[in-house]
Image (spheres, grey):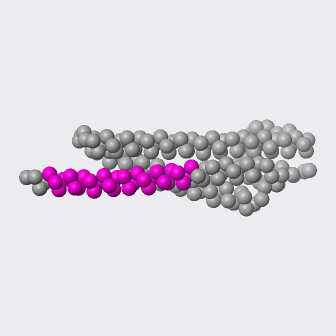
Amino acid sequence: DDTEELEIAVDNTAFMDEFFSEIEETRQNIDKISENVEEAKKLYSIILSAPIPEQKTKDDLEQLTAEIKKMANSVRNKLKSMERNIEQDEERSSADLRIRKSQHSVLSRKFVDVMTKYNEAQVDFRERSKGRIQRQLEITGKNTTDEELEEMLESGNPSIFTSGV
């Protein structure tokens, strides 16, 4: 009878080892997203401070944005998977379940914080880009509506800024 209990404990240990491995991998991915967000902020600043931003900088930003989205989706899916597993084990009130819930909660908060910073940086960049376009157009004597500015931002076509100048 003691042998069975020992086997269960060993299985549980292996399960928790796997869980902590997933936690660590997810934490590393969130840290990588955070690093990429900081890099994106630098590229935003470079683009906004250059009279005519280099195409390479824009391409780097586009690549970084794609990487952030890809990693964020992966982390989001992993967190959802962990949450489903925790919910399935909900009826077993055990120390390892509490540990898993706690780890999941910490990672989820960290992920939300990182993605919030990224979204704030994107909004700031968009607003500053809009202001820059508006100033450039005012210099050329053109008045634009907010809708026209939004259209220009969406198209990403810089020739719009100089047409008719």
Q: Residue furthest left?
A: 1
> How many numbered circles are shown?
0
Q: What residue is rendered at 76% in x and 38% in y?
A: 146
- Of 149 and 8, nearer the camera is 8
Residue 75 can be seen in this image: no
Q: Which percent across, then down, holds residue 142?
A: 88, 41
Left or right: where does residue 23 sit relative to residue 39?
left
**What type of secondary structure mainly makes up the magenta span?**
helix
Observer-nearest residue: 9 or 162?
Answer: 9
Q: Residue at x 59, y 42 (%)?
A: 117
Residue 131 lies, with reference to residue 156, above or below; the image says above
Residue 9's x, y, as percent? 20, 52
Residue lying at 61% horizontally and 50% vertically, measured from the top left: 37
Question: In the rendered image, is residue 74 in sight?
Answer: yes
Going by the image, does 101 lie left or right of 135?
A: left
User: Outermost residue toward the bottom?
Assistant: 56
Is 135 located above or below residue 155 in the figure?
A: above
Quarter assignment of residue 123: top right
Residue 13 lies in magenta, yes or no?
yes
Query: Between residues 32 and 116, which one lies in front from this camera angle?
Result: 32
Q: Position of residue 26 (x, y in %)?
A: 45, 52
Q: Which residues are magenta?
A: 5-34
